[in-house]
Amino acid sequence: MPASPSTPFRAPADPRGAPGVHRIPVPLGMSSVDGGPLASVRRRTREVTLETIYLRCEECGALDNLRRAAGLLPGDPVAEFRGEFFADSDVHKWLEAACWHLAEEPDDPALRARIDATVELLAAAQQPDGYLNSFFMGERAAERWQNITDRHEMYCGGHLLQAAVAHLRATGERTLTDVAVRFADHVWTVFGPGRRPGADGHPGYETALVELSRATGERRFLEQARWFVEQHGRTPAAIGGREYHLDHAPLTEQPEVTGHAVRALYLYTGAADVVAEEPDAGLMAALERLWRNFADRKRYVTGGAGARHDYEAFGAEWELGDERAYAESCASVAHFQFAWRMFLLTGRGEFRDAMEQVLWNGLLSGLGDNGEDFFYVNPLADNGRHRRSPWFGTACCPPNLARLVGSLPAYTYATSGDTLWTLLLTEGTVRTELAGGALELRISTRYPLDGEVVVEVLRAPEEPCGVALPIPDWADGASWSLDGADLPFEEADGFAVLHRRWQAGDKLTGGYRMPVRPLAAHPRVRAAHGRIALTRGPLVFCLEQADHEAADVRDIAVTADGDWTADPRPDLLGGTVTLRGTGWAPPAEAADGPLYRPAGEPWPEARPVDVTAVPYYLWANREPGPMQVWLPLADGVEAAPSR
């Protein structure tokens, strides 16, 4: 593990000492992800994606916008501005991602130099009154704070604050933190009790304020965060009163998740941070209610959020179309962050399961295996035209994915009292202080490609302590043994808690059976009616045309109780596991059949075809072709028993 900087590592959102939490995250520098699929993703992000995003910010003008605002380039800021009015946020998110990686690899002079230069640039661009947004410079300075509903000034500021906290925790230096404090103080001179009403039209500022309060010890930022959360749904309306902006009712009265999916999930995330610091039964009840509606009615099987391209919105209950799914990558990041905070608040395993579901499916799918291309939209079916792009006009997703991946070790473990809780199973090491002393573990696993896990105790406290390992909702049993003897455990809301006096050298072995688990959706989910999705462990699988020369994957049907075999493929897509089985498809000439035919007239008889399913998060990394997650059920075919 890396050496600690002058200030202790902390998690991206660190509620240490907060009265409302049941679990405390293990700090970033105290755990590692150094093997298996997650390590590969993080290494590629560190070596390729960070550089790619920085160069894109140069090419699209986001960095020059800030340089011109700082007086470092000639030209008029208004005439020369390039990109969207929220382009600053892409730089802020890149900087946050870079800082999390620097925290783990502090001896990287090139990365450190680029971070230092960006911090200096932001400090130089900040105005004397604390304002910082390169779009509203020069002649547009008079437009500041005139349209907080749509112009994203607080949203950009929120990502500035989060980058500042990451920089402080990675380096121990306050340069960017001081910039963030001046910005937040400026905002509070404009908005607040006795001043202007208002709320962030694109939430994100609220959670950043809470974290700035934690990083600086200044309670005033927490008070600001609560005030902005409570501004939603006020009368008269602070930002227009629309559901799209989550302004149609106070958050405590909203009955369902609605409006813009990313904005909503960011608002809930900020509210969860407020509850952590200032327990509030009414606000917590609202978060529980909104979570239930999302999880039970509006969440894709991949963990994606947002059914509609129009307004990037959730849509109605059960409205979970496949080919037209929006499921924005940023919404998956927000889902992960909201679920994590709800776990910290409650300790319930369902929130850990949600983190795993969205991470391994609808979130990592946003990253191409070359590290240079990205998905904005993550559909569950495609005709072969949807491919990752090197950048977007609205480029929020690439740096958002990078900052989440960069900070993943901090989401991997948590503690309470004398127990260490494992949230994301991955190869790596963790050390922490429990009530009875220091505990250090080494976890070896290829999860989620298989379910075998080895936990080696490197250091243990003198007193008994607990090691809690997840029992996911998909698990077909879990077992653990020590020195060949079965080790009993206590089940605690989605976890197996093994409590004993551990000794250095103890080796805990076990894991999970991972049968293929076909899933059916609620009958009201029309896109999945009469279809199933193939899952194994936390992974959702799909069919890609690249693996099926004999049939169009859009025509392949399967049986619910088919005989599927997990096939490790170290040679495929960087190393993965596929599912192999048999499906049924009409003859190729059937594709030229009539568009409509009389009801009851038989379709050409199906023929068996070999089927290979790949993890959804890896799709679209080979040649273009159709893709399907939800597979039609074959009629009248007698299937082999499942194993």
Image: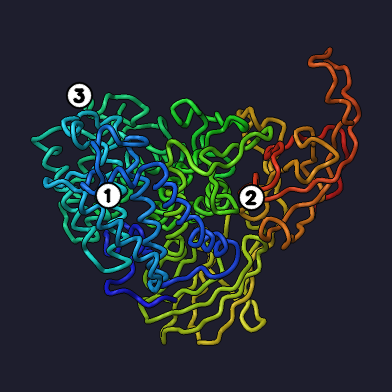
N-terminal-most mark, 2 or 1: 1
Q: Identify the element where label 2 is drawn.
A: helix
The image quarter in which residue 174 lies: bottom left
Q: Residue at x 48, y 52 (%)?
A: 52
Name the residue nearer the viewer: 530 or 44.
Answer: 44
Q: Disc 3 marks which residue?
A: 236
Query: Can you tell which mark lies on residue 274?
Result: 1
Can you say whether 601 is above or below 285 in the image?
above
**Residue 288 image offset from top left, x and y in percent:** 40, 43
Q: Of circles 2 and 3, which is in front?
A: 2
Q: Which residue is drawn at 71% across and 38% down?
A: 625
Tell me the CA gap for discs 1 and 3. 24 Å
Q: Identify the element where label 1 is drawn.
A: helix
Residue 139 visible in the displayed image: yes
- The amino acid on which the numbered mark 3 sits, given as a three-letter code, is Pro
Q: Identify the element where label 3 is drawn.
A: loop
Residue at the top extreme of this rendering: 598
Circle 2/circle 3 CB separation < 8 Å = no
Label 1 packing within 10 angstroms: few (<14), some (14-19), many (20+)? many
Q: In which quarter of the image is the N terminus?
A: bottom left
Query: Can you tell which mark lies on residue 618?
Result: 2
